[in-house]
Amino acid sequence: MSKCTCEYCPTIIVPGIGQSKVDLYSEDNKRIKCAWPLDVDTKAFVKKIIPSAIGLLITKKDKAFCKALKKAVAEMVTPLRVNKDGVPTENLHIVDYSGRSLKVCNADEKRYIYKMVPMETLAAVIGEDHLYFFAYHSFGQPYETAKRLDEYIQNVKKETGHDKVNLIPVSLGGSIATAYFDAYGSKNDVNRVCYFVPATNGSTLIADAFSKNIDLSNPVSLLSMFLDSNTVDIFTKVLKRFKEDTAKNIVNAFVDGILETFLKNCPGMWAVIPREKYQEYRDKYLVGE
């Protein structure tokens, strides 16, 4: 494409956790369901824990329920499973819009993107043909994602005829931008960066999960990442029926199911551990693995 003479560099949104879709496929590459955000069968999830939940309510002893809950959570997040080498074990496909600008995205794609990152005002100024949404796997490997982002930038430059792009990293996208600038910053392809609540020094929510230091008075932020709003509401109401020690054991069982299935082996999540906590969690989860 010939060099564009407009005054606006194309802008690439690097979204946050939960803002890019990833689909789960079978071994023969047939789509099964959405892997992230999780497509949870709430009825099936509740059914797995009901028998032990009844026992918990009767006896007030939480061991059997916590075991059942941990297993049910682990099965729920299986599409996100990561092995000890930090590699996803399932056949996952990113819904990536094929590197198209918003101008050529269809109505459903635009609706979704604007819902995730409301950029209508910016689009009205620079034009939807200069606005792009870089989708990626939130629980993937940051430097692999940075490599994809570099390739994406080259394609956007070629498509628009500009020498440089602008980046808008959102939340988790801040850690992807950090990896990108570390690996490819010397290429000088970026005109300007506008960070939006970036996780450039980690996430307290993820750190709390690693330390199992969840605020029992308000565990909604963590639970909402993995469960629908109705299930979260029921879960939090149930927690209030128990003493603090029991409630803590229940929440920790939920966290254990996530940690052991994918979180503790996921490079993308290690990238958002606050630097002051990294050594402590490294010694706890990685040394000797």
Image (cartoon, grey):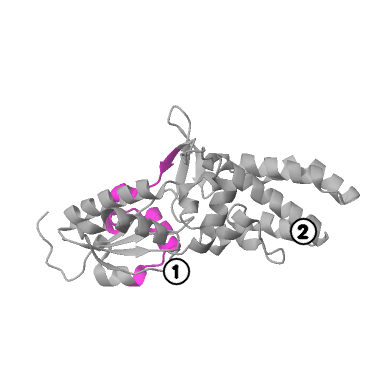
Residue 1 image label: none
Residue 119 magenta: yes
Tell me: residue 65, above or below residue 133.
Answer: above
**Residue 182 in sight here:** yes
User: How far from the left and from the top, in percent, is residue 191?
Assistant: 23, 66
Q: Give the residue type that dot 2 points to.
A: Leu
Q: Which residue is mark 2?
A: 239
Residue drawn at (36%, 49%) of the image:
143
Q: Which residues are magenta?
A: 92-121
Residue drawn at (78%, 45%) of the image:
65
Q: Quadrant of residue 231?
A: bottom right
Q: Which residue is mark 1?
A: 197
Q: Give the residue type that dot 1 points to.
A: Val
- The reply to whether dot 2 and dot 1 touch (C-beta < 8 Å) is no
Q: Quadrant of residue 116?
A: bottom left
User: How far from the left and from the top, in percent, is residue 26?
Assistant: 48, 31
